[in-house]
Image (cartoon, rainbow, N blue to C red):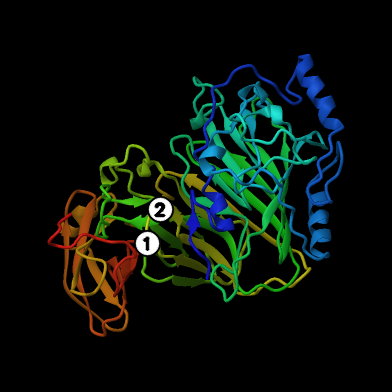
């Protein structure tokens, strides 16, 4: 069983996805570029890069060489045919703290492509990010290797050693897009589009959101009898965009104990940012549990949970629900912070999409000006091509605080890949405000009197769609609530609470004393006209202290 993901005090590789998202960005000053047009500085820098050598594992090339996705696939296949060799950690730079690492700033004068709509900035290795990655720029069909330069960064005095082992590389990079806020400096924090830092994690945000949940290349053995594996992106190739380009392509080479792979990510910023992923995987050996298109998020508590002791915000989470869509139904699984690790599977032969969603955009439901949970993005994944039979999987891991990524969602194929045979897998991620548009009534709020079954639990679930309230008043819709074994349901009522919203209320009691699963939906003429609300009422309290009735809230 894997442990929780830690944002600051990282104890596992999974924490790599959490530590870098609040790094500071300095304002843009004097600019530099790689192949960005006229000027001797840009041409001189290209000449320097052409002769650069970066050794990160022994299989990267020198200087400029022809490159396309077929070359990357051949590298991945060759890696998979050899025994796995982990990248060596860079010595001398992993002992300082997270706050020390945050104090390292990329110099805005070293930003690449500052005369274009996309801009490239780099991360220095350090803290937990002590495995260097090779970063290339593709100009035409030639790949140019970027050497690591200490002069690209501002370091606090005495933090970085004066003499570094050579050669080393960067820890990761981020892309910015000045189309988000044209009037601001291109290096402004809100102009960030995507960040690659740590293992195979990456985060994206739309023009109106901030960074929240994360995606990664693969999830392997998340819940297994042995430790979870974390394959790493060990090299990147970034295609230089044209001056007015509104999308950019990144290639990545993945390597891990059980798998190697070639990835192409086509990134398009916008109010809803999209990432089209084309991957070709080569497995060295069978794996116990394979998660494709994985997402990781944080859920501590919501309006349907009891607020923990000493927490003032009414809700704390990066995502509030898991959404799954098939040709015949749409399921909304309200997330929870369980006492024990919980795993839920949703089998499907014709999956249309799944994702982790943050629907509640009301500041007063979070009341946190610093964290701004109402601005966290939702991520919706749609298959490219036919995935075949399999199951969408949701894992909930207990967490006592908001510093842990404790929610994991991914797709598990029914037929596992054969070792050393190419395994293609394509999908598209859409990062936007409150998830995909639905033709059926959407679930917008869940309220509960308690989280556990020490007493009967009263629920109120709000459904919303244009004209839904009028349909209820005319008697055209009805509510259906059903539970699993041991659940007793009572006091089921349906009422309109607005022109577009109806509320279903009911009470749940466990006859066995164990957790029970409950579902609810709206029907018209025996056909579902809403998402299916899905929730498990626990029989134990959440893993944090909550105020008693005497202490109050």
* SS label for mark 2: loop
Q: Give residue 539's quadrant in the image.
A: bottom left
Looking at this rendering, what residue extends furthest in the top direction?
A: 39
Q: Secondary structure at mark 1?
A: loop
- In this image, 355 relative to 33: left or right? left
Q: Which residue is mark 2?
A: 319
Residue 543 circle label: none
**Mark 2 nearby-residue class (10 Å; few <14, some 14–19, many ≥20):** many
Res 269 visible:
no
Q: Is residue 102 left or right of residue 254?
A: left
Q: Position of residue 152 (x, y in %)?
A: 68, 28
Residue 533 in view (yes/no)? yes
- Disc sitting over residue 335 in the figure: 1
430 sits left or right of 322 in the view: right
Image-quadrant location for residue 254: bottom right
Q: Residue at x 69, y 49 (%)?
A: 131
**Contact flag, marks 1 and 2 (Cβ < 8 Å):** yes
Label 1, label 2: how many angstroms apart (C-alpha)?
Answer: 8 Å
Count of numbered circles in the view: 2
* Residue that lies at the very extreme toward the front in this rendered image: 158
Depth check: give the residue in front, 194 or 443.
194
- Residue 451: x %, y % from top left: 26, 66
Identify the image quadrant of the C terminus.
bottom left
Depth order, front residue of 227/361: 227
Residue 139, x across and y down, in percent: 79, 32
In the rendered image of this protein, does residue 549 appear above or below residue 157? below
């Amino acid at each position: 069983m894997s442990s929780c993901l830690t944002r600051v005090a990282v104890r596992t590789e999974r924490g790599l996805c959490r530590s870098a998202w609040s790094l500071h960005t300095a304002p843009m000053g004097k600019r530099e570029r790689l192949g960005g047009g006229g000027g001797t500085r840009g041409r001189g820098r290209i000449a320097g890069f052409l002769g650069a050598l970066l050794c990160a594992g022994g299989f990267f090339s020198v200087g400029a060489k022809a490159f396309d996705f077929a070359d990357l696939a051949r590298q991945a296949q060759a890696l998979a045919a050899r025994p796995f060799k982990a990248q060596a950690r860079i010595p001398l730079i992993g002992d300082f703290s997270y706050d020390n690492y945050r104090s390292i700033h990329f110099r805005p004068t070293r930003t690449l492509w500052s005369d274009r709509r996309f801009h490239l900035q780099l991360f220095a290795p350090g803290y937990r990010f002590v495995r260097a990655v090779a970063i290339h720029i593709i100009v035409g069909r030639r790949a140019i290797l970027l050497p690591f330069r200490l002069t690209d960064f501002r370091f606090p005095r005495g933090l970085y050693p004066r003499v570094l082992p050579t050669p080393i590389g960067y820890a990761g990079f981020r892309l910015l897009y000045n189309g988000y806020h044209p009037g601001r400096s291109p290096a402004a924090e809100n102009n960030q589009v995507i960040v690659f830092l740590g293992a195979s994690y990456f985060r994206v945000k739309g023009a109106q959101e901030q960074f929240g949940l994360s995606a990664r290349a693969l999830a392997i053995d998340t819940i297994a009898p042995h430790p979870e594996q974390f394959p790493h992106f060990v090299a990147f190739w970034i295609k230089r965009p044209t001056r007015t380009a509104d999308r950019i392509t990144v290639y990545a080479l993945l390597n891990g104990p059980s798998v190697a792979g070639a990835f192409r990510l086509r990134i398009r910023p916008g109010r809803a940012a999209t990432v089209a992923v084309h991957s070709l995987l080569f497995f060295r050996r069978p794996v116990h549990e394979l998660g494709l298109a994985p997402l990781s998020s944080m859920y501590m508590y919501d309006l349907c949970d009891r607020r923990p002791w000493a927490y003032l915000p009414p809700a704390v989470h990066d995502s509030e629900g898991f959404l799954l869509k098939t040709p015949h139904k749409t399921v909304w699984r309200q997330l929870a912070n369980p006492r024990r690790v919980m795993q839920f599977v949703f089998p499907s032969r014709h999956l249309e999409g799944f994702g982790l969603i943050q629907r509640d955009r009301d500041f007063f439901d979070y009341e946190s000006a610093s964290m701004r949970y109402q601005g966290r993005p939702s991520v919706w994944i749609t298959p490219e091509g036919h995935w075949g039979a399999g199951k969408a999987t949701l894992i909930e891991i207990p967490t006592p605080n908001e510093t842990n990524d404790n929610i994991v969602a991914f797709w598990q194929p029914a037929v596992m890949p054969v070792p050393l045979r190419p395994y293609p897998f394509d999908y598209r991620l859409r990062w936007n405000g409150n998830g995909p548009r639905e033709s059926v009534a959407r679930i917008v709020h869940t309220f509960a009197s308690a989280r556990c079954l020490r007493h009967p639990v009263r629920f109120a679930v709000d459904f919303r769609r244009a004209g839904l309230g009028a349909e209820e008043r005319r008697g055209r819709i009805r509510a259906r609530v059903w539970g699993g074994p041991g659940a007793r349901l009572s006091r089921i009522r349906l009422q309109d609470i607005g022109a577009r919203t109806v509320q279903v209320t009911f009470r749940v009691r466990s006859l066995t004393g164990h957790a029970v699963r409950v579902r609810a939906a709206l029907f018209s003429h025996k056909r579902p006209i809403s998402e299916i609300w899905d929730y498990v009422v626990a029989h134990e309290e959440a893993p944090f202290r909550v105020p008693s009735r005497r202490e109050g809230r």
